[in-house]
Amino acid sequence: SAVISQKPSRDICQRGTSLTIQCQVDSQVTMMFWYRQQPGQSLTLIATANQGSEATYESGFVIDKFPISRPNLTFSTLTVSNMSPEDSSIYLCSVDISGFSYNEQFFGPGTRLTVL
Amino acid sequence: AQKVTQAQTEISVVEKEDVTLDCVYETRDTTYYLFWYKQPPSGELVFLIRRNSFDEQNEISGRYSWNFQKSTSSFNFTITASQVVDSAVYFCALSEADNTDKLIFGTGTRLQVFP
């Protein structure tokens, strides 16, 4: 498995501001992922972040709203830009530690975001 | 289209009861992967099991067991002799061979185990 940490663990933000969430892994991984879990809902993949390339976004998510950085094999950030109350969610990063053919994703503890 | 259905929104049991969480999936791929995750109140997702589509053997791990039935597209999860610590939301998920990194989650089943 992998030890994954996220900062902050929770935050309360004002409408119109931006928040950057950090994800740190204790080992080098190729694939990192960002998910959103809206209140009482399931998880939805926002984007896949590979080191050294642009993030790949899922339908319904755009780079201007959720810019992602992946500067090295152990770290990634997700920014939630120009926030509105609809962005209130838990944001989770995950990593695939086993390579392409095996697909085991482990999740961080999540960042609980409330937008007022 | 790919889809995961967890029809049970919430289940309540008393400690020591057995409980089965249902998961039905849809996919056109012949190669795919199925997962179960546990999300306790703390919010962290805990990986429980991965099963690939070519392995229909049922699996048992302590009080947990999984029943994979390709004929009914189901991957059900049973907890034997449930405990209060089993209280959590349980998610079933699917990924397909052409995009193994994209997990498609069901809506989750909230399990409450009362003492």
Image (cartoon, rainbow, N blue to C red):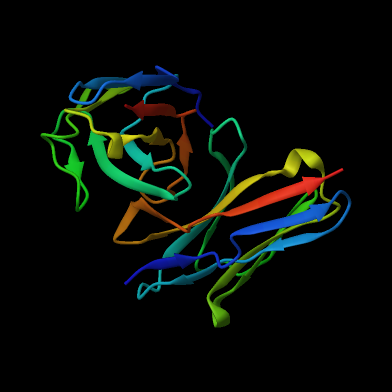
Q: Quadrant of the N terminus of chain A?
A: top right
Q: Is residue A24 visible?
A: no
Q: Quadrant of residue A27?
A: top left
Q: Quadrant of residue A65?
A: top left
Q: Position of residue B36 (x, y in %)?
A: 57, 52
- Say left or right for B41 vs B33: right
The residue lying furthest to the front in this view is A116
Residue drawn at x 25%, y 41% as measured from the top left: A47
In the displayed structure, A49 sits above or below B29; it is: above
In the displayed structure, B13 sits above or below A113; it is: below
In the displayed structure, A59 sits above or below A33; it is: below
Q: Position of residue B115 (x, y in %)?
A: 87, 43
Residue drawn at x 43%, y 28% as measured from the top left: A112
- Say left or right for B79 vs A47: right
The residue lying furthest to the left in this view is A64
- Say left or right for A7 vs B57: left
Q: Quadrant of residue B38?
A: top right
Q: Position of residue B9 (x, y in %)?
A: 59, 60
Of A5 and B7, nearer the camera is B7
Q: Quadrant of the C terminus of chain A?
A: top left
Q: Is residue B60 visible?
A: yes
Of B87 and A93, nearer the camera is B87
The residue lying furthest to the bottom in this view is B71
- Say left or right for B38 vs B14: left
Of B20 and B112, nearer the camera is B112
Q: Position of residue A89 (x, y in %)?
A: 38, 36
Residue drawn at x 56%, y 82% as measured from the top left: B71
Residue drawn at x 24%, y 35% as measured from the top left: A49
